[in-house]
Image (cartoon, grey):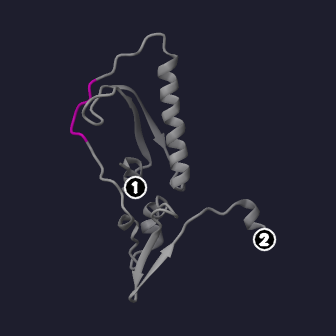
Amino acid sequence: MSPLTWQIIEGAQEIPICLIEAAEKMDSGAVIYRDVLEFSGHELLSELRRLQGLATAALCSRYLEEDEPPQGKAQTGTATFYRRRTAADSALDPTRSLAEQFDLLRTVNNKLYPAFFDFRGQRYWLTISKSHPADEQG
């Protein structure tokens, strides 16, 4: 599933990340560690995934470095599940500004599910990348 991506699209800039005990039912185990990923709002998908991977590895390392495994805390509240993203979820609305749709645009995968919009009977594909300082010097 794609909870990080969906939460970014929803406008979240702080997203919880947890290490949970394995359980038969998906994501239902006790929470061993909980941390929060904080984003600035400019990160593209590759950066989001990199930061998520680093945070996940840090939680795993923390667990492995413990002398005794810590006791997890049972999860409470209603579970939140996000459906798997599809290529159709990368559709932009040509009547809305890029600023309004930036969180969607920054979470697309340029190769697997690039951003697109339909306009005047045609489909147009967009890719997104950041410029680098060397690019600016022309």
Say left or right for 30 vs 108. left
Mark with earlier residue (1, 2)? 1
Q: Quadrant of the C terminus?
A: bottom right
Label 1: element kind = loop
Q: CA distance from mark 1 to mark 2?
A: 34 Å
What residue sits 27% from the left and 32% below the top? 28
Q: Amino acid at mark 2?
A: Gly
Q: Nearer the viewer, residue 97 or 75?
A: 75
Farthest right residue in view: 137
Whether tag 1 and tag 2 are in contact, CB under 8 A, the answer is no
| Image coordinates for residue 70, horizontal then vertical, percent | 39, 16
Task: Report crowding for label 2: few under 14, some 14 to 19, many 20 or more residues within 10 A (C-alpha).
Answer: few
| Image coordinates for residue 53, horizontal then vertical, percent | 51, 40
In the displayed structure, 73 sits above or below 103; it is: above
Task: Report crowding for label 1: few under 14, some 14 to 19, many 20 or more residues within 10 A (C-alpha).
Answer: few
| Image coordinates for residue 12, horizontal then vertical, percent | 40, 50
Q: Which residues are magenta?
A: 74-79
What residue sits 37% from the left and 48% below the top? 3
| Image coordinates for residue 23, horizontal then vertical, percent | 28, 28
Say left or right for 72 vs 57. left
Farthest left residue in view: 78
Q: Which residue is mark 2?
A: 138
Label 2: element kind = loop
User: Dominant secondary structure of the magenta stretch?
Assistant: loop
Residue 11, numbered circle: 1
Reply yes or no: does residue 18 show up in magenta: no
What residue sits 56% from the left and 50% below the top? 47
Q: Amino acid at mark 1?
A: Gly
